Amino acid sequence: MSKKLTVAVVGATGAVGREMLKTLHDRKFPATEVRAFASARSAGNKVPFGEDELTVAELTEKSFEGIDLAIFSAGGATSTKFSPFAAHAGCVVVDNSAAWRMDDRCPLVVPEVNPHALGKHNGIIANPNCSTIQMLVALKPLHDAARIKRIVVTTFQAVSGAGQKGVNELEKQVRDLFNAREIETKAFPYQIAFNVIPRIDVFMENDYTKEEMKMVNETVKIFEDPSVRVTATCARVPVFYSHSESVNIETEKKLSAKDARVILSQAPGVKVIDNPRADLYPLALDATGCDETFVGRIREDESIENGLNMWIVADNVRKGAALNAVQIGEELLRRDLIRVTDKNVFMK
Ligand code: A2P
């Protein structure tokens, strides 16, 4: 690879896109140039990049000439339409949407869990769903130690998971309610202020939501283990940033809570906060702005022979999206994989 490395952020005006720019800057990603793209609506607007500002350009099919790596967070439709043009231009895509996650041509990667999967990329790499990422960062070391047979997860997901419009809606509803004004509901199916909504994304034929099925299917793909059974319930809560998850696992081998704590305290990207006596456990407010996945409330499930319960929290915009995507970029660089071997794989 040449020394020059041009990186694009697509969806640079969105909640995750802005965090991607911040993460690239904070981690000193070795780009010689960073470009910002969004829709025609934002062309000419400025977005912060460290001390500087970048001028946003409209994304077109021709935007990828001369770009080595494009990190997308602009929704599934934009990614479906434009990523093949990026790969065709020799630009490697890391995409944050659900568009390519279950496509056999695309690795689905959490760098702490399955970085080896990058070796087979064809130009488009998928960033998993935010709830899947934090769950698997915590569960992979336990899977390696005791083989997980079944996962039962309930999520408590922040409004920022729905993008900037989700953040704005919670803020406005709270202000309007305190001022005795009518509230507007657009980003979520019901009022989210002071409420909990057990539905994220659309319902599927089996009455699970798409978000819940993402956790099921993505876990199997990332673990490369179809024998792991997963069931999920995903709820939206009136929290701005950081998703919390109640996770129950059943393992093949016995794993005590104490052993799990030791394993997790040595695991990459994980921080254990688990001291009931001192009233310490992971909190969404504390996780916000942090890179780590926090795990606590680790205890043995006394209703089965080999089971554990735990509480997993991470910043959904950071580790659940922007940071994971940038870490994939770093891993690609480390492995000298920022190149597209067959530029036509997604054009056929
Ligand atoms: P824009 O601000 O111009 O609409 P969020 O997830 O916070 O809602 O952000 C979505 C991001 O995706 C925004 O940056 C948005 O840009 C961008 N986006 C939406 N549609 C397109 C498109 N057709 N081409 C490029 N970027 C798009």
Image: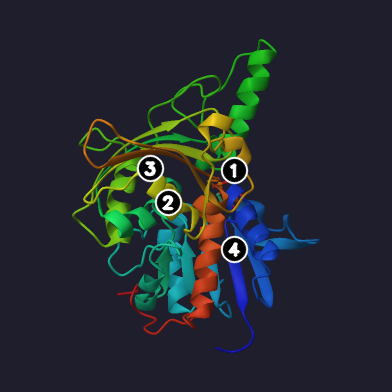
The foreground one among 228 and 204 is: 228
Residue density around tag 2, few if under 14, some if 14–19, many if 20 or more, within 10 Å: many
Q: Which residue is mark 4?
A: 9
Residue at the image position 60 percent from the left and 14 percent from the top: 182
Residue at the image position 54 percent from the left and 27 percent from the top: 238
Q: Which residue is mark 2?
A: 138
Q: Nearer the viewer, mark 3 or mark 1?
A: 3
> Label 2 is placed on what type of residue?
Ala
Task: Indicate if the residue with disc 1 has its beta carbon within 8 Å of ligand 1.
Answer: no
> Label 3 is placed on what type of residue?
Ala
- Give the spatial CA distance, label 3 vs label 1: 22 Å
Residue density around tag 3, few if under 14, some if 14–19, many if 20 or more, within 10 Å: some
Residue at the image position 20 percent from the left and 36 percent from the top: 206
Q: Which residue is mark 1?
A: 287
- Give the spatial CA distance, label 2 vs label 4: 28 Å
Ranked by sequence position, the earlier of labels 2 and 4 is 4
The foreground one among 304 and 113 is: 304
Residue 108, x across and y down, in percent: 37, 62
Residue 151 sits above or below residue 327 on the image: above
Q: Which residue is mark 3?
A: 257
Identify the secondary structure beneath mark 4.
Answer: strand
Residue 322 sits above or below residue 278 on the image: below
Residue density around tag 1, few if under 14, some if 14–19, many if 20 or more, within 10 Å: many
Residue 107 sits above or below residue 14 on the image: below
Identify the secondary structure beneath mark 1.
Answer: helix
Q: Nearer the viewer, mark 3 or mark 4?
A: 3
In this rendering, would 304 be left or right of 139?
A: left
Ranked by sequence position, the earlier of labels 3 and 4 is 4
Q: Nearer the viewer, mark 3 or mark 2?
A: 3
Residue 242, x across and y down, in percent: 55, 40
